[in-house]
Structures are given as structure tokens and as C-alpha cells.
Amino acid sequence: MNIVVCIKQVPDTTNIKINPETNTLIRTGVESIINPFDMYALEEGIRLKEKHGGTVTALSMGPPQVEESLREAISLGIDDACLLSDRAFAGADTLATAYTLAAGIRKLGGADIILMGRQAIDGDTGQVGPGVAENLGITHVTDIRKIEQIDEDGTIIVERLLEDGYVRLKIKLPVLLTVVKEINEPRLPSLRGKLAAKKKEIVTWVEEDLEIDSERIGLVGSPTFVKKIFTPPKPSGGKIFQGDTREAVASLLEELKKAGITAGKKGSEDGNN
Amino acid sequence: METIKILLDKCSGCGLCLKVCAYDALDLVDKKVYINERCTICGACVDVCKFDAIEIYRRSFKGQDVSAYSGICVYAEHRKNKLSSVVPEVIGAARELKKDLDKTISAILLGSGVKPLAEELISYGVDEVWMIDSLEIVDFAEDIQADLVARILMEKKPEIFLGGGTIIGRSLLPRVAAKILSGLTADCTELTIDTESKFLKQTRPAFGGNIMATILCQNHRPQMATVRHKVMKAAEKVGAGHNGKIVELHDIPIPHSKIEVLEFVEEQTETVNLAEADFIVSGGRGLKDPKNFDLIEKLSKAIGGAVGASRAAVDAGWIPYSHQVGQTGKTVNPTIYIACGISGAIQHLAGMKSSDIIVAINSDANAPIFDVAHYGIVGNLFEVVPELVKQITE
């Protein structure tokens, strides 16, 4: 079985704070990490390989330092890693990113199962997965919380998390799945893995290595662009109550009543229930 | 190909751009700024530069003839023969845009036995429903739905296409965008029409809600967006004077789905549907013991809400993942969010910051949760929560 896990290197948002005076974004030594959701995709890829055999390859697109993240993936038990890195890829929106990643997967020889995290914590879009699947002409399912089984006949049974429950689906391979945190508990790198990661040669492909239309990559290939970035207005100072519990609770409920909130009145103002 | 450039003669070396760059992609050398390889051309530095010293060159790939597209179209998501609750909100957003565009609102409705839903869409102010009613279109057969939506969009050419920012919407629309090669913006919290250009201005949170970005799609149509649930005001029903029409599309072939639905399992507890809840009570590490989630449940029952949890509580195994609110859990937008014993790590705030009213109950007056709370009680939650239940039920 050929498994490809697509990962993204993202800034660790725990280190991003808002300057309360200027209300601007401040960065205090931002470290780059593998997108947390992708850690679950990597773990699931390794587990599938352990159970069903084959190879599991990590693929990413980004600047050269993404190589560090790919080495981290190797240290966890990923067999091979490949980086798509070229200035021409920069500035890509989700459409151009999906197109480029799909070209990378094709060059890798395709895959039976492609795994990704449900979304990246910097962009929060979750749009690249379905886009990659469309570019490859394969089925996709998002928000997978469990891979139940893979059968000899080339079908897979999965559980997809929904707002109000879950749905069990049976799909013919190849398939692209995006995963949620519930799917597993990622392992830590082993000592052997760390050694392997040091030695491993990470393949890097530039634009010329891929069969792609240069009009559809990077900034040029992106229909959307960011017109403006701003920090959201911070909430005006809240009312905080302390001291006697009964009085504090009474004051709180009084304030909520003033704000027009009555407990238990569920969605009646929307008129759509 | 150089797409971002620092105009060194204008750069004052003030370093403001370094502070806003989330990718550490700018270096200050000898009082001039240089861009390094980490740059993703996100544009944050361009906006902050007071000297107009940073330029991004944009040249978009061959777009369509934009003038051939007209009108606003919404995707009518539904399940078990009921419109999803996000649909009136999407129509509400479309009706707001219509005020500035003066174009018709259409809806794409796919499924079997969906005629009554078409009537319902019209009652919300939709002018035209493009409907395919076929037994072959079952719930969750997203692959064929994406295919049909793309075909309808290419045939009908609306200039704007909107869907709900639900699990389904955020899976279906990206697939459609990749089929028709147009731009899609995820999970928008504000949509407006630019008065001059008439482009759709799509505003959305990123970096876990720490920054907002306004996004445009200039040369491609339709301009597509998913809309965050419970942010836009739901459309109210229109009077009998409104005449909408149902257009059945018979000649579009329906492909065969590769997804077989085995079963849909609705979560047993009423307390779990955080996406729909108007009231959410969440518990965190401050609860100290899994059995103390009883307190949270009692309060949520008293106000008729759902139960949420911080990542710490979920990771400790106190409550299932489906309750987790935050960056690696769910994003929620209730009328009231009550955080009990949650310190308010930035990852948690990312999932609940846009709630209408945030109430924090925590023993630590310095907990970051109080920075975003509209109301708060500094105190022992084991006393405060039962007292709240008592006073509410009285």
C-alpha cells in the first residue's frame, strides 16, 4: 500500500500574542512546528503501514526550512519525505497549493491513501485536501475520526465526524482523508527514528521537476488574494464580580437580563427552529 | 519572477513590518529590511508599512469573462429532508448583498423528494431555486453533489456562490472550486460589496482569530465563500407577495457516487451539538475531577445549552473529543459561552472568541480568559456554578 501524508509547517501560534496597546500582532520568537492536525495524519499513516505494509511518504510545499519538519516526520517513522520548494510556489492560495501538491503526488507515483490534517492552524481553511483530491480525480472525505478497516477488495470503511454525530462510509480506494484529533494519539520520535532522520536524504523538487502549468502556481495561480489584514477589535473591558458568591451570581444574572438574555430561551429570536 | 519587493529608498528601517510578520521572513540589516526565503507573500507587512516601501506585484492567471456572470447563488444544504440551520443565515447574507448589487438570489438544491425544501427556500426570499430531484442523490454522496454543483454554476453563471461553513459545506465547496478553478474563502464572518468595484469583500479570521483578513477574488467567477455558522443574521420569511420560481434541471446527467453510506449515528446526548447551541457551558482543568462535569451538565441543562470542554479536560479523558472547543476542536458561536475553570489558553480562545457574550468563572483573577470575557466571576467554581443553577431555576 502506498500512503502519502501531506503536512504543512506553521508558526506555533502559542507564541503569537496581541500587543494590548497597539492591538497589533506581536511575535516573540516564533518557532515553526508541524501543523498539529497533521501530526495525527502522520501517526495514522505510520499505523496503516505497520498494519498493511507498503510505504508511507511525507510531502510538503514551502520554503527550504520545511525540511526540518520533514525530518521530524522521518523521526516518527515515516519512510520517505519530499519537499516542493520554489520561489514560484510562494503566495499560493488554497487552489494553487492543491494544484501543486497534486502534481507532487503524481510525481511520487500516486497513492492508495492520502492523509492530511483537517485544517492548518495558521490559515484555518481546510480547503487544500478536497482540492488535492479533485486535482487527482479521486474521492475525498473530511473529518475522519476512525479508519475501521481496509479490505482485500480495495475498499475502506471510515467514520466521519459531523456536528451532530458521525457517519460510517465505505469508499473504494484511492481516497484522500482529512483527519481530526480523535483518530489517534501521536507517538514520540524514537532514538532510532532520530538517527534515521539525520541521515535521510530529503528529495526537493522545484517547478521544473513537476508537470505543471506555470500559470497555475504561486501568487499568479491564485484567484484570491488578501486585500487587508487587521487585528479584530478587542472586547471592551468586561464586568468582573468578586466577593460573596450569592451576590456575584445575582449581579451577573442581572447584567445578562439587561443584555436581553433570558436563560432557556433557545433560538426563539431567529425564528428558524 | 519577483512578486514581493522592498523599495529600499522608501524603507526607513523602522522595523514595524518585522513585528507583524508571522513567518519570520524579514530581516533588518543596516537599517534596511530584506525579505528572506520564509516569505509566504501573505501581505501583512504591506498593510503595516507607513512608508509604502513594500510592494506586491499581482498578476492573476487567465480569468473568465467576468461580465458574463450575474446574481448571487446559495447552496441549500439539507439532511433528512430538513434545511440545515445555516441555510437561512446564508440567505440572510445574500439578501444583504442584494441590497448593494440589485441582482437575483438563486439557490442550488439537490436531493430526493426535496420539492418542499424548494418552497421553503422561496419563503426566505430566494428568487429562483435550481433543483435536481433524484433518488440517486442521497445524503453524504458529496462527490456527485460537487459534480452537479459545478455543472450548474458553469451553466447558470452566478457572480457569487455562498455555502454554509459546516462540515459538509467546507468539504463540498473546495471541491467545487477546484473543479471550476475559481477562488474560495473559508469561514467568512463578514461579506460586503465594494462600492466602487462591486467585488465581494470577504472577511475571515485566521491564526485562530488573532487576525482578520479581507480577501478579494477579482478575475474569477463565481466569487465563492463559506459562511461561519451563527454569525450572519438569519433571513426572515418574506410575505406572500414574493414570487419565486422552481427550475428543475432535468438534462444534467447524475454521475455514480463512489461513497457508500453505511449508517448515520446521531450522538445520544442533546448536549453535544455545539455548532447549533445558543448556550454553551464549558469545563476545564479547574474542575479537577471528571465527575465534576456533573456540575457543568447541570448548569447547561438549567439554561438549555450544550456542554463544551477545554483541550486539557479532553486530553485527561474526562469527556469525549466531540465536546472539545478550540483550535484542535470545534469553533463555536453561541449567544452565551460560559467558561468554568478554563484559564483561556490562546488555542481555546480561538474556538470561542466570537461568541456574542462570554462569561468566565475562574478562581484566578489573572487568568487570560478574563481578557476576552464580557462578564466574569472570580471565585470558586464549586460554589459559583451550583449557585448559578439555583438562582436560574428559581
Image (tube, coloured by chain):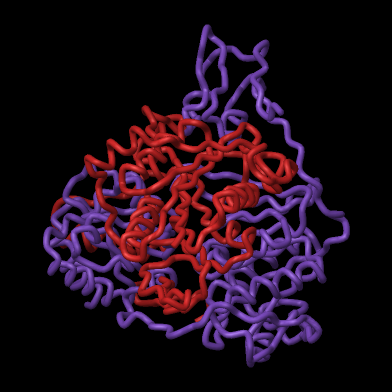
Give the camera-side residue of A82 and B284: A82
Residue visible at 26% across and 51% down in the picture: A187
| B31 horizontally vs B182: left or right | left
- B215 over B351 or under it: above or below: above
Question: Which chain is displayed in purple in the rendered image?
Answer: B
Give the x, y percent position of residue B1.
71, 28
Left or right of A135: which side holds A241? left
| Residue A15 in view of the camera | yes
- Does residue A253 appear in the picture of this structure? no
Query: Does B311 appear above or below A11?
Result: below
Horizontal placement of B134 versus B333: left or right? right
Chain A, which colour? red
When asked about the image quadrant of residue B225, the answer is: bottom right
Please tell me whether residue B267 is drawn above or below residue B352 in the rendered image. below
Image quadrant of residue B64? Answer: bottom right
**Along the line of sight, the residue nearer the viewer: A116 or B185:** A116
Q: Is residue B363 above or below residue B109?
A: above
